[in-house]
């Protein structure tokens, strides 16, 4: 069983982020933590087995105070069996923790940090409206190492309007110089309900397929040359440092999501927790069901999802997930796919076209 906890608080709302989030106001308090723990206790009878991985996402989980973070972690380990948890990740942003809080996170058994840097170059940081500098991002990384985190991931973004190939190269070089265990490199997409999407619709922010491809392949080549294995379209890792929690998603494991806006896939059902923090807290306090958008996953739903997700991975997708061999033959002839030992793998040329290839195979 895998556990995800959504903590929606951000002291600064990034204009490109489509996840449910908001500034803390007076909601980042003990009552919020109690609400998450109440939801966890309510779902406990549906959960079987021990927690294999846990992930605190957001938002910015490191905005929780040391007291509230301690209460949350200890509450969860009191409810669930973490005795065999092999990875516990927390997302963080620069300037949301100091050495003392980083050391506390380590003491609370959190073993991995995903640090949202996005860029190190001033021009790109300004476009993204990030509230940290290059030096602050580097200091934030070094603080985690000082707190004895031996698993740290850096999140970067590319193909941002105005971002040059040289700036992206600089971002990659700076990231590699820090020697993180893992690097996520995400192609900017325009998400619903974001300022970036509104600016894109007016023509202020562009898309450029050539820029997408050039920067994707620059990352692929540079990171692999520097010892990072490309194990999923947007993810690179040093040996044995892949994100075990994300791999569980990609290969269809059940997971329980807690907190406002979290998604759960459990026992053939999928639902979202009420994505509104204040009503969510009131509902949990009253013992009400906080689930929304409940759906029963059909076998066809599972097939299509497995195909789309697994095709993006190093292991590829099983040929048994394909209804007809015709698309495979055509894509293979075009040099976008190869079949090996009953699995379909994207070629180097196919990796930049993962989503349209998956759609063609579906």
Image (cartoon, grey):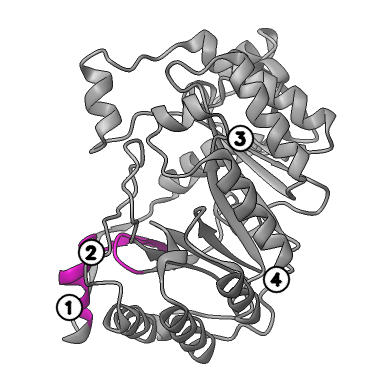
Q: Which mark is residue 274?
A: 2
Q: Position of residue 234 (x, y in %)?
A: 60, 36
Q: Kindly give the residue lying farthest to the bottom in the view shown.
A: 78
Is 310 placed left or right of 348 in the picture?
left
Q: Is residue 16 left or right of residue 208?
A: left
Residue contact between numbered discs 3 and 2, judged by CB atoms under 8 Å: no
Q: Residues within 10 Å of mark 4 (few under 14, many from 20)?
A: few
Which mark is in front, 4 or 3? Answer: 4
Image-quadrant location for residue 149:
bottom right
Q: Secondary structure at mark 2?
A: loop
Residue 266 seen by the camera = no
Is residue 278 shown to the viewer in this render? yes
Depth-wise, is mark 3 or mark 2 nearer the camera?
A: 2
Q: CA distance from mark 3 to mark 1?
A: 38 Å
Q: Residue at x 18, y 81 (%)?
A: 288
Q: Residue at x 30, y 53 (%)?
A: 20
Q: Residues within 10 Å of mark 1 (few under 14, many from 20)?
A: some
Q: Which residue is mark 4?
A: 86
Residue tagged by mark 3? Answer: 312
Marker disc for residue 283: 1
């Amino acid at each position: 069983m895998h556990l995800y906890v959504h903590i929606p608080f951000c002291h600064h709302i990034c204009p490109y982020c489509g996840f449910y989030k908001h500034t803390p106001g007076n909601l980042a308090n003990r009552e919020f933590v109690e609400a998450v723990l109440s939801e966890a206790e309510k779902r406990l009878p549906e959960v079987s087995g021990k927690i294999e991985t846990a992930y605190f996402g957001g938002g910015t989980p490191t905005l929780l105070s040391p007291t509230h973070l301690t209460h949350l972690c200890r509450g969860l380990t009191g409810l669930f069996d973490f005795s065999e948890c092999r990875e516990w990740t927390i997302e963080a942003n620069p300037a949301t923790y100091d050495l003392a809080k980083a050391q506390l996170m380590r003491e609370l058994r959190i073993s991995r940090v995903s640090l949202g840097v996005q860029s190190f170059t001033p021009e790109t940081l300004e476009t993204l409206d990030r509230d940290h500098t290059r030096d602050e991002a580097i200091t934030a990384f070094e603080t985690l190492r000082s707190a004895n985190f031996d698993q740290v991931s850096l999140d970067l973004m590319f193909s941002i309007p105005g971002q040059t190939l040289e700036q992206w190269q600089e971002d990659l070089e700076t990231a590699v110089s820090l020697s993180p265990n893992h690097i996520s490199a995400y192609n900017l997409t325009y998400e619903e309900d974001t300022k970036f999407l509104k600016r894109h619709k007016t023509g202020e922010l562009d898309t450029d397929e050539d820029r997408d491809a050039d920067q994707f392949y620059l990352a692929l080549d540079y990171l692999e040359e520097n010892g990072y294995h490309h194990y999923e379209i947007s993810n690179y890792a040093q040996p044995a440092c892949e994100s075990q929690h994300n791999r569980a998603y990609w290969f269809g494991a059940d997971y329980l999501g807690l907190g406002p806006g979290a998604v759960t896939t459990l026992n053939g059902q999928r639902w979202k927790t009420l994505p509104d923090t204040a009503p969510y807290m009131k509902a949990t306090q009253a013992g009400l069901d906080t689930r929304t958008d409940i759906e029963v996953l059909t076998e066809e739903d599972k097939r299509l999802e497995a195909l789309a997700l697994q095709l993006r991975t190093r292991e590829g997708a099983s040929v048994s997930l394909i209804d007809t061999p015709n698309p495979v033959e055509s894509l293979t002839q075009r040099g976008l796919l190869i079949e090996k030992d009953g699995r379909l793998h994207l070629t180097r040329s196919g990796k930049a076209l993962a989503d349209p290839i998956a759609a063609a195979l579906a």
